[in-house]
Amino acid sequence: MNTALVNLLGFAVGVALYTLLLLMVLRNRRKDKRIGLLLLTAGLGITWNLSELLAFIWRDFAQNEVSPFLSAVSYSALGFLPSVVVHSAEDENKNSRLLTVMAYGLSTFAALLHFKNAFTNGDLPSNLALRFLTFGSIALLAGLLLFNYRQELKNKTVWIAALLVFALSALHLSSTSEGVNWIVELIGHQSSLPLVLAILVQDYRFAFADLFLKRALSLLLLALSAFSLYIFVAQPLSYLHTSHDENDPLKIAILLILWIVTALFYPFLHKFSVWLVDKVLLKRVSYTDLRKVIYQGVEKCQTFNSVLDLVSEEMREALTVEKFSWREIYHESHLKNHPIVEFTTQKAEVFIPTNEPPSYRISLDNFLGGRKLLSEEVEMLEAVSLLTARKIDALRVVKARVDQETREQEYTKLTTEAQLTALRAQMNPHFLFNALTTIGHLIQTTPEKAFQTLMKLTQLLRAVLKSGGEFYTLGEELKLIENYLDIEKARFEERLFVKIKVPENLYKIQVPSLILQPLVENAVKHGVSKNKDGGTVIIVAEINEVDSDAFLELTVCDTGAGKKATDIAGSGGIGLNNVRGRLKSHYGEKASFSIATNEENQTEACIKLPVK
């Protein structure tokens, strides 16, 4: 009884599975020469299972054997399935194509033997045909391994398993052990299922794994669960009620309860089938983990291109796409209410909706294995699209801020340079005017000294004009001051004395150019020139430390009896304003400038500069 039940259940499930496969192929067909293999597989599977199911029903109701031609058709259909497996494994190798031709020839020869017996009232199925198929399957398996050596190992494993199961099935069907064991019957009569699974996994891993394999495994598990509950629960309990009526309510209630339990188990069986297909057969990545990987990757990217390249590459690997590309989109009217993910059977386009144009579009071309996007994959692409858009927006904000800071720094630099140029332009004519006045006076009194002074002025101007920088060394600055004072000595003669107290180790310190000249000029103009006895101009430089910071102090004082320090400081002349402006431009609040009267009643101008 159990063997008959296994066969009936197996053939019924087989009809359902192959019909499901046929409908899915017709509904989701695409331009692929191998789609014919699936149609052929579905047709052969339906023919085999439906013919055997009808034969079982006919024997039970009609109490006689079915037409021999129906048996010949069913066994011929079964015999062609291994040829389809070989055909699906075919590559560009000529020997592989020859193997396919041999496989179909073997199946055709076996079918002819079945129909010969049908015409001559011989045994069906033909034992000779089944033995040919047994040994032929083994030979085909050897040929596949020999000629398709370039194929991956996992594909070879699928062929081996499928063809070996079929070889055992054909061997069983050709023997006289029919109905001995229900496990043997299951393997013997349902060998077509491993064959169709081999074809699907080989060429249509994604296209029909999602559409067929998950449902097929769910149906198989459901049938197996129902059969197991009947064999191990319902049947033992029914033996306890052999003395009861055939329509015993308790016996019927047990069957109904088991049916309900089977229905309650189906959602868990389907989830297990989905997990088995996704994680074991297809080895799909975890989309939650993929989003984390992409998030961590884009956080390290610093450019738009690197973000788009990383996201495209990650999606290409996760979705088994042959190639990818991305491009910019500028037309704002086209982007309004734009769908994030658009896809066909061969291509998907992911829109990256950035806040400001340009936006981007990532194209994923040529899905491998006939893959089709699932709803969860579309959700993953939408989430990654928004993540990518936000990262690009963030990079744009950072770039805009950096560009703005760069522009502001450039504007500040240009403004400072303009201010310094203006200050120097104010100072140089002022100095030159005073020097020329001195030379003009000497021309009237002592022409020879006027010529020498003119040469000094020439050297001074050449040195000033030669250096276009804003900074001199202190040594160069003192050299210019000495030239200036030499010019002034020509005017004041014995009334002007100079003392320079600067250690040589400070000569290389950088100071703003001509920063001392206005102070020395003021000392001469307001100090020495106003004293009938003249005076001395003293220049001092030294390093002092304040709170671990080093400062260069430059002091210019005179022994004349000119204006008071407060009057000079508040006069707002060109020279002093020049000094204050340049110090502020170069050093900000770190430098200082002051004019005071010291303990010896001398006017003293002091500049304090930060130095390294």
Image: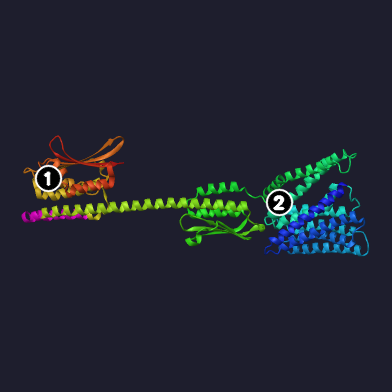
User: Residue 64 bears which disc, if any?
Assistant: none
- Look at the image and give the residue range highlighted in magenta: 440-462
Q: Is residue 461 magenta?
A: yes
**Is residue 544 shown left or right of residue 15?**
left
- Residue 559 image point, x, y percent: 12, 40
What is the count of numbered marks? 2
Q: Residues within 10 Å of mark 1 (few under 14, many from 20)?
A: some
Gap in angstroms between the C-alphas marked 1 and 2: 103 Å
- Residue 435 image point, x, y percent: 14, 53
Q: Which residue is mark 1?
A: 526
The quadrant in which residue 422 appears is bottom left
Name the kind of residue labelled 1 in the image.
His
Name the kind of residue labelled 2 in the image.
Lys
- Residue 409 image point, x, y percent: 34, 51
Q: Residues within 10 Å of mark 2 (few under 14, many from 20)?
A: many
- Disc 2 is placed on an element classified as helix
Q: Which residue is mark 2?
A: 214
**Is residue 131 shown left or right of residue 270?**
right
